[in-house]
Amino acid sequence: MNYKDYDESKPPYMEFANDDASIYPILEAFAPNKDHDALYKLNAIYRWSENLMANASSQAVCKSGCFHCCAQKVAVKPVELDNIRTNIGGFQARDNGRFCPLLDIEKGACGIYEVRPLVCRAMLTFDNPKYCESGERHWIFDFKQLNPVMNQVLVDHELGEYLAHNIEQIMLGEEVDLRDEFQP
């Protein structure tokens, strides 16, 4: 996608997958005859969000080396903190000033990319990334847009109410800023 200046009248075209193939990670993880733990279910939510956002992600200009969104608050749920702590490997938090301590500034990439929280997975921009750095208004997609999309897919699905309840149970708890939890 070519960079374009912000034009409120011309949003990027986004289609969100809502078929059984895209929702399969959730169907499998929350099947009544399965006994998966909370981290398995959380990672199914992550896989589902990526399936939903495949079209949007393919249009985004976000790439390694651009990390201005990493200066924002990173709101995570307790289960996401558990997931990160369980899977962080040898990566150590760093003093990155105003940026997330889990950012690898030298590489310009998330140091925990595979287990990054949902709020990070949902952050995309569609026009010139210079706007991220300057703070100018521009086209972004974030959790505020992803959450209604996820809810709409669940409403449209025959098991939607059951799945929504179970997802909500996994994502319970007070949000904290990831940056406060991982200090160098």
Image (spheres, rainbow, N blue to C red):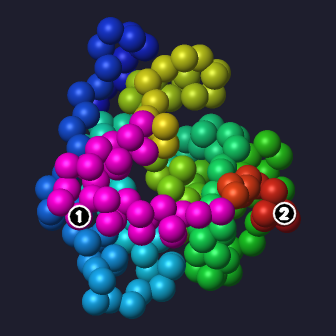
Which residue occupies 59% across, 63% down? 172
Tell which of 170 and 92 is nearer to you.
170
Q: Residue 92 vs residue 58: left or right? A: right
158 magenta-colored: yes
Local secondary structure at mark 2: loop
Residue 31: name its quadrant. Answer: bottom left
Give coordinates of residue 153: x percent, y percent: 26, 49
Residue 44 in the image: above or below residue 37: above
31 magenta-colored: no
The C terminus lies in which quarter of the figure? bottom right
Tell which of 173 and 96 is nearer to you.
173
Give coordinates of residue 3: x percent, y percent: 37, 23
Sequence-wise, which precedes: disc 1 or disc 2? 1
Local secondary structure at mark 1: loop
Residue with the mark numbered 1: 159
Which residue occupies 63% across, 28% down? 133
The N terminus lies in which quarter of the figure? top left
Residue with the mark numbered 2: 183
Stretch of the chain drawn in magenta: 145-173
Which residue occupies 55% across, 41% down? 66
